[in-house]
Amino acid sequence: MWATLETLHDVTYFAEGVRPAGMALGLRGYWMTYFAFRAAPLGAVEAGPVVAAFAGFCPAMVAKALPDAWSRTTPSACLRARAEVSTAALREAGADPRACERAARLLGPVTAAADPTGRPLFAANAALEPPDDEVGRLWQLVTTLREHRGDGHVSALVAAGVTGLEAHWLQIANGRFPEAVIRQARGWPDGEWAAAAEALRSRGLLTPDAAPALTAAGRAVLAAIETRTDEHAWTGGLSLLGEQGTEEVIDLLRPSVRAVAASGMLPQVNPAGLSLAS
């Protein structure tokens, strides 16, 4: 289910129209567009809440975009633009409008009833008026549930005593994505990047190698975080669908997911750790 939601959501980051849409609003380049579009449901927030909610980004990187973005445009304009560009990207890739409409009917009640406790990005997205367009409505619903899981993942990291920066190292050591890809996308300077790896080594979670691997303890911590993330996504939201409903949504959206993957819109190696092989 995560791979289904993530693939359809991620067009809002990688579609060709994203950067031009932001710049048309007066935003300065890709990363200001990224932070403004994704944070727009929260309103005209400063950098701090976004650093906390997004997790894993260097605070200085976020501060380059926010709050400057709100002197150039408004959250409402960003919400309209991101919905338009994401809907267009899904349609151009070949997403099935009828399947999107049927899946949206199943997911709508889930997002309306899911638990918002400790989930700021989910709650902010859930409060948005869904688009009339069936593909756009589906994109907003998968985005809302994607952020629901993401909020729960941050909670699981905190419970495990792992920072957003340290989480990158655990995933690098697990082979989720190359170090260069996630480091470039998250903006951490040399000193803080190296210190995070050393902190995990001191806890016995990474091996001492130059290219560290997970120790047995590291594998256990990462597995517990991922398990807790999945459990929170289920008990706090998707359980309302039930196993049969979840499988129905996945089946309905499988052709659209494959169409997006086949379009080449999403990079094969990406910061989400999303595999596009299938």
Image (spheres, helix red, strand yellow):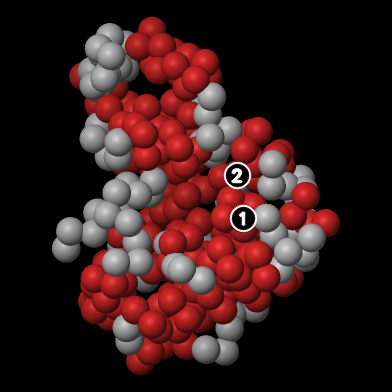
Give the amino acid at mark 2.
Ala
Residue pictured at 50% horizontal, 56% vertical: 147
Q: Please say if 162 is above or below 256.
A: above
Give the amino acid at mark 1.
Gly
In this rendering, the label closer to the viewer, 1 or 2? 1
**Where on the picture, by quarter, is residue 178?**
top left
Q: Is residue 216 visible?
A: yes
Q: Is residue 253 left or right of residue 65?
A: left
Residue pictured at 52% horizontal, 48% vertical: 151
For the view shown, which residue lies furthest in the bottom direction? 98
* Residue wearing tag 2: 53
At mark 2, the secondary structure is helix
Q: Residues within 10 Å of mark 1 (few under 14, many from 20)?
A: some
Where residue 13 appears, as percent x and y from the top left, is: 48, 60
Q: Residues within 10 Å of mark 2 (few under 14, many from 20)?
A: some
N-term-proximal mark, 1 vs 2: 1
* Residue wearing tag 1: 29
Q: Please say if 206 is above or below 251.
A: above
Q: Please say if 243 is above or below 207.
A: below
Where residue 5 appears, as percent x and y from the top left, is: 37, 64
The answer to whether the residue labelled 1 contacts the one labelled 2, judged by CB atoms less than 8 Å apart, is no
Residue pictured at 53% horizontal, 35% vertical: 187
The residue nearer to you, when weighing 149 against 231, is 149
At mark 1, the secondary structure is helix
Where residue 190 appears, as percent x and y from the top left, is: 49, 20
**Where on the picture, by quarter, is residue 122?**
bottom right
Q: Is residue 34 left or right of residue 170?
A: right
Where residue 223 appears, as percent x and y from the top left, is: 28, 34
